[in-house]
Image: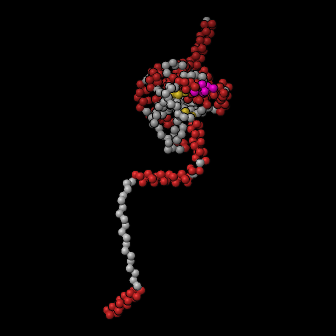
Amino acid sequence: MESKSGNSEDESVSSKTSKQSNVLPLWGNERTMNLNPLILTNIQSSHYFKVNLYELKTYHEVVDEIYYKVSHLEPWEKGSRRTSGQTGMCGGVRGVGAGGIVSTAYCLLYKLFTLKLTRKQLNGLITHCDSPYIRALGFMYIRYTFPPANLLDWYEDYLEDEEELDVKAGTGQTMTMGLMLRQWLVKLEWFSTLFPRIPVPIQQKIQKHLENRFPPHALQAAQERDRTFDRDRAPKNDQRPVRDDLRREFLRDDDRRLDKDPRFDRRDREQHGRRDREGKYKERSPRRDRSPRRERSPRRERSPRAHKSHRHREDRERRTRY
């Protein structure tokens, strides 16, 4: 009897530990998921989240929705948020002053948070083989909700993942999964929002680990390999833009030629430009035949004697009148 009771106690303890291990840790705010307040407000008030995602009740339905709807990882849809005229806290990456149309990726990320994922479900997300965006939202869920000390343990096996995805709204910024995860461990900024801060001691530990695993010369070699791969994969008829350094050198040579040649002094150039403009205006305007001016007849000058006689005559008339 005692052995049976002891075995039952061991089974209960093991079942409790297995249940606890399947529950994921949550770090930070349990209501907001550590999201930006403006993004969270737009998610909760969006029609897509309140109507479309409200009907999804299970984990598998949400995964299918990610597969069909998510095409980038920005928090805002393309062209819906304008911060060009804003300064300080109202512009830049913080997203305080101006909102927009929140993206389906962040709506589905918050929907996953409301489902309270288990460890098994999260592992199913980050190892999913159908879409890279399903995996990316799983890694983003870890970055927003997990304790900073556990981030490296979850990302460790995927830091060299070569699967590619386009993270920008409207396409144009393709990166590998491993590069994206390394960027999330080192940088706080992600397009127009911020990830939760990592304490300085943990950040230094992560930085040191990445430097040991990915030395600078190895990173440069990998970048060169990616460039050559892209160059070989590009079509032959594709005309690539001229490099900026070559363009600057070419313009600099032209400036030197102009400076050395005395004919192209600033004053001379201004005069030449003015003459060219005047010549163009003269060519455009039609010529008119102007009649010659009539010569004026010369004025007759009065002699001083006649002037005096005229004055005496006026005085005489004035006296006789009065």
Q: Is residue 257 above or below residue 238?
A: below
Residue 288 lies left or right of residue 201; in this view the side is: left
Residue at x-position 56% and y-position 35%: 243
Residue at x-position 44% and y-position 51%: 280
Q: Residue 192: where, in percent of width, then height?
A: 52, 36
Q: Residue 31: where, in percent of width, then height?
A: 52, 31
Q: Residue 142: where, in percent of width, then height?
A: 56, 26
**Tally of numbered discs:** 0
Segment colored magenta? 221-227
Q: Which residue is more in the foreground, 252 or 148?
A: 252
The answer to if 222 sits in the magenta stretch is yes
Q: Quadrant of residue 94?
A: top right
Q: Quadrant of residue 68?
A: top left
Q: Quadrant of the C terminus?
A: bottom left
Residue at x-position 59% and y-position 45%: 257
Q: Residue 49: where, in percent of width, then height?
A: 44, 29
Q: Quadrant of the N terminus?
A: top right
Residue extending farthest to the left is 321
The answer to if 210 sits in the magenta stretch is no
Q: Name the dominant secondary structure of the magenta segment.
A: helix
Query: Can you see residue 73?
Result: no
Residue at x-position 61% and y-position 31%: 186
